[in-house]
Amino acid sequence: MEKQNFFDLNGPRYEVREPPDGQWGVRDDESGHFTGIVGSLEREEGDLSMVLTPTPDRLEVMDHSRIYGEGAFVIISLKPRPATQHWAFVKSFRDELWLTVLGVVVVWGVLLWAMLKAWAWIRRDKVLQKLMWGLKS
């Protein structure tokens, strides 16, 4: 089977041509008309051109689309790896939150330890226990 171009079957019909004089297009001082590619567009012999720099003279006879230039810098990096599943929850919160949680756990642990020691001291001292609970001996 013969390979066919997608545009040949479905898309717009177009023809690629070069201007007869082989120039980009400058204004002729005598006639006031353009030569080259710009002249072809001015005479409506062509519909579009791919590479033309907008100048004040050219803007009088044709419209330009937005220019997208190539960047001079290229950034190359490795493809990011997915986070391991058992540590994925850590990256979902900011560092400040994890430090706060750690601080609360430490303070709560110390507070519970102190309460346990206080309770053990209260339980050992029978006099204080009797006073607290109103028990008679």
Image (cartoon, rainbow, N blue to C red):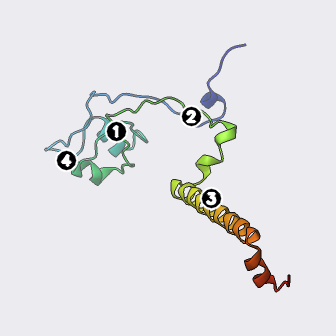
Whether tag 1 and tag 3 are in contact, CB under 8 A, the answer is: no
- The amino acid sitting under disc 4 is Gly
Query: Which numbered disc flags the more N-terminal residue, 2 or 4?
Result: 2
- The amino acid sitting under disc 3 is Val
* Quarter of the figure with the C terminus: bottom right
Snapshot quadrant of residue 81: top right
Real-space Cα separation, disc 3 to disc 4, in angstroms: 83 Å
> On the image, numbered disc 3 is attached to which residue?
105
Q: Which mark is residue 40?
A: 1
Real-space Cα separation, disc 2 to disc 4, in angstroms: 32 Å
Q: Which mark is residue 32?
A: 4
Report whether 5 appears left or right of 30: right
Real-space Cα separation, disc 4 to disc 1, in angstroms: 14 Å
Report whether 32 appears left or right of 106: left
Q: Which mark is residue 13?
A: 2
In what element is the residue under mark 4?
loop
